[in-house]
Amino acid sequence: MSIPYWRLSGFYFFYFAAVGGFLPYWSLYLKASGFNPVEIGELTALLAATKVISPNLWGWIADHTGKNLGIIRIASFFTVLLFAGFLLVHGYFWFASITIVFSFFWNASLPQFEAITLLHLKNETHRYSQIRLWGSIGFMIAVIGIGWLLDSWPITVLPIVISVLFTLIWCMSLVIPEAPPRKLELSAPVGMMQLIKQPHIIAFFTVCILLQMAHAPYYVFYSIYLKQHHYSATLTGSFWALGILAEIVLFMCMSRLLKRFSLRAILLSSIALAIVRWLIIARCADYPALLVVAQLLHAATFGGAHVAAIHLVHLYFGRQHQGKGQALYGSLSFGLGAMLGSLYSGYYWDLMEPEFTYSSAAIVCGIAFIIAYCWVGRENTQNQATPN
């Protein structure tokens, strides 16, 4: 069975195009809707909080039923339906309620799609980045296009644009083929709890949580931060797009990098560069050239770290627990980590100034580097993305 490259890539394209409409601009929409920084942080934290529960619940169902694709289709449909509620309601209570219910379904899709993609790739998992890069392309096109749109149209158009993108995600889910059936494990199965109690896996997930905590002030407040420094919406979108362009270039090279470097080396390098990135953003917001450097580092701080993490989860959890493993990675990093980061950045944004928030992100990455250096990927069997 051949790999359905374009259909898998198309789903990533529209999924991350929706993320590209959401992450850079949703905080601006919330601010325009009358919410203060604490409320913006709390609403973003609610979005992340559902990732702690939703992917694990859907992952458990997927691994017990083998219906990963069915879950993606159902979740994508209800995402469209529920997100449309933002077009009808106003006020903190209603925004919080819709955020919880729509994101419960939205957060179900991606971990199961990651598992489906890896199952389609079989023994060619090093090609994952060649498919995933289309998600980055979708993100980049969305942030540039929507940034340009918002310079000419009111911010109230944003929920309509995102609703259209969510509809396209659901349409793509309908044309994705089923993944090849999982092969039976010949060895005695290892329980999920036995896996996650292992010290190197605990350390790995702790690092993932800390990295997303550090990224949260960027995702929630970076556009507001740039606006405070008098950058236009178009230029703000261009900064976001530049980071994604750098990520795309990395994804194009990643299959070669995975053959040359260990997952441990890629992960540690990515964390070290994240420290540099957050310090630049904290101290150099008035210097566009340095912000360009910071955005180019997104290739490592997100792209490199994410690809290393996806491959480590694939190695750690095997076929038997792949859906649950990818869900656990998503829920702890993009769920718990993002929730904690959104809360602390929201509470301290006005209280301690933005520079303090981004400097704190650098410190968090420093802690993650120490943990990863001491415990993650030290054994060769934990370290290879592709067979030798």
Image (cartoon, rainbow, N blue to C red):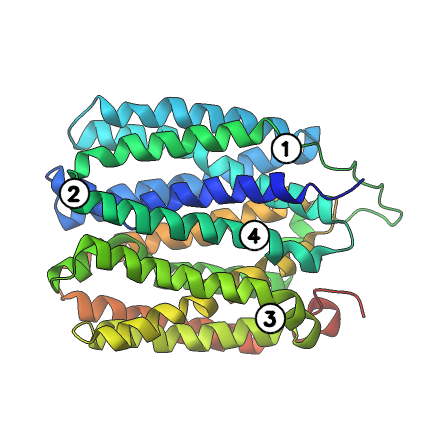
Circle 2 sits in a helix, a strand or a loop, which is it?
helix
The disc label shown at residue 130, or none: none
Q: Earlier in the sequence, mark 4 or mark 3?
A: 4
For discs 3 and 1, the disc positioned in front in the rendered view: 1
- Residue 78 at what x, y percent from top left? 44, 24
For discs 4 and 2, the disc positioned in front in the rendered view: 2
Residue type at mark 2 is Ser
Circle 1 sits in a helix, a strand or a loop, which is it?
loop
Residue type at mark 1 is Ile
For discs 1 and 2, the disc positioned in front in the rendered view: 2
- Residue 136 at what x, y percent from top left? 47, 53
The disc label shown at residue 132, or none: 4
Q: Earlier in the sequence, mark 4 or mark 2?
A: 4
- Residue 175 at what x, y percent from top left? 61, 29
The disc label shown at residue 376, or none: 3
Check the image and report above or below for 351 versus 318. Answer: below
The span from disc 2 to disc 3 (Cα, nearest Å) is: 48 Å
Circle 3 sits in a helix, a strand or a loop, which is it?
loop
The disc label shown at residue 152, or none: 2
> In the image, is 125 to the left or to the right of 264?
right
Q: In this figure, which residue is indicated by the disc labeled 1?
A: 176
Which residue occupies 31% across, 34% down? Answer: 161
